[in-house]
Image (spheres, rainbow, N blue to C red):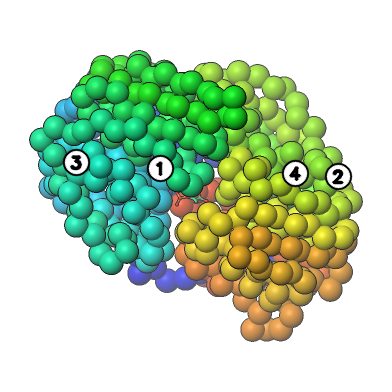
Amino acid sequence: MHNHTPKPASAHKSPPLKGKARVPGDKSISHRSFMFGGLASGETRVTGLLEGDDVLATGRAMQAMGAQIRKEGDTWIINGTGNGCLLEPEEPFDFGNAGTGARLTMGLVGTYNMKTTFTGDASLSKRPMGRVLNPLREMGVQVEAADGDRCPITLHGPRTANPISYRVPMASAQVKSAVLLAGLNTPGITTVIEPVMTRDHTEKMLAGFGAKIEIEEDADGTRHIHIHGQGELRGQTIEVPGDPSSAGFPLVAALIVPGSDIIIENALMNPTRTGLITTLQEMGGQIDIINMRDAGGEDVADLHVRASNLKGVVVPPERAPSMIDEYPVLAIAAAFAEGETFMDGLDELRVKESDRLAAVARGLEANGVECHEGEMSLTVKGSPGGKGLGALSAQAVVETHLDHRIAMAFLVMGMASEKAVHIDDATMIATSFPEFMDLMRGLGADIQVAN
Ligand SMILES: O=C(O)C1=C[C@@H](OP(=O)(O)O)[C@@H](O)[C@H](O)C1
Ligand SMILES: C=C(OP(=O)(O)O)C(=O)O
């Protein structure tokens, strides 16, 4: 996968999108299902797991540390080691393209008195890991890392880790989670202070597995999360809801392709993940949230989406954590809206699989969209109906920089723009949404991938 041959792809103006689609399982919950199931004692059964490359890499890492994982029919069955009982892996971990897998596993294993090495692809090797390594160092972990705390990274855990109280300096569920997971194998209470709430899957799922975890919230919304170390975790039954970040692609496609009318089934509606829906509704998007129900402690719903005349909005910076992975596809919606859309508070976009702020701005420019890339903001001027949009020349190919969300967002753009949109590589889509092409074509999208 690391030296893969790129597969260029193009999307063309498509007929109205129609029908029902079920997006694959949530990536965040799927990673955590393998991790916590692999750690807990007894059996964990998981249905709806995302079988994307990122999540499968996490499964292999847990197997390398003693977890038993197998699949029977649609159910993944995991027999974990028991908390505190992970084994030293014989080989370096290869996390491929996955920031979540690498960072959460660093936390999970860092406090074990053993040696672990983390590697990944060219994208992962550029991403900052100091944000996770710094709290681990405070807990007693010794780190060997390439310049600037990038992968490959080797961790040497202490004999006994030191519980800390750590204030997360940026809005990051990965950093919060890494420290909480490190606390699982640390005596006493480890505390994470989270000034801005991010996705809360780690807290919710750890409580479900029987960890002793307490959360206090200050008047200003700052959360203090306390995890009691060295407790027992017990296997669970998990039903993974559909990924709202993946749902964003058919959702925006149906809003911008004229005449579309689709239903997206089983999307996770956890309030820490619904910022895109809120924003698109403010833009005038016709999105009805139907059949809201509880699935294993999480809200899920179906989304009825109809093509809409969108208008530009100001997206407040405090909304960023609840839609952090959705800005690329929101920028595409903005390209079809009347007027300007201003998105702010986007500094974290610079350290994703690519510098997403720059990648989106370059891709929009290559396809005739007027936009302005600020230090941590993006302004997009829309062209209702997609008039004049699409590849400006035969050379206008969107560079995806090993980033699945850039690839999918620009394919969505091509479904509604006047001219086709071309991307340089569709391979990375398999990290989070292997069914993307089939699902979109099933709704009527005209996408072509080079052989
Ligand atoms: O905890 C998680 O599962 C994730 C947290 C977010 O990353 P950050 O913590 O870096 O914001 C998000 O972008 C990523 O796709 C998944
Ligand atoms: C940022 C993402 O994932 P990760 O950090 O796990 O690579 C994403 O899926 O958009």
**Which residue is disc 2 drawn over?**
284
User: Label 3 amino acid?
Assistant: Gly
User: Label 2 amino acid?
Assistant: Gly
Q: In the rendered view of the protein, which quadrant contains the N terminus?
A: bottom left
Relative image position of residue 263 (x, y in whole percent): 74, 36
Can residue 276 be seen here? The reply is yes
The residue at the point 35 percent across, 69 percent down is: 3
Rendered image quadrant of residue 147: bottom left
**Which residue is disc 3 drawn over?**
140
Q: Earlier in the sequence, mark 4 or mark 3?
A: 3
Give the SS element for disc 2.
Answer: loop
User: Label 1 amino acid?
Assistant: Val
User: Label 4 amino acid?
Assistant: Thr
**Which residue is disc 1 drawn over?**
175
Q: Nearer the viewer, residue 54 or 356?
A: 356
The residue at the point 80 percent across, 32 percent down is: 288
Residues at marks 4 and 2 touching, judged by CB atoms closer than 8 Å? no
Relative image position of residue 16 (x, y in whole percent): 82, 52
Mark 1: is the Cβ under 8 angstroms from ligand 1? yes
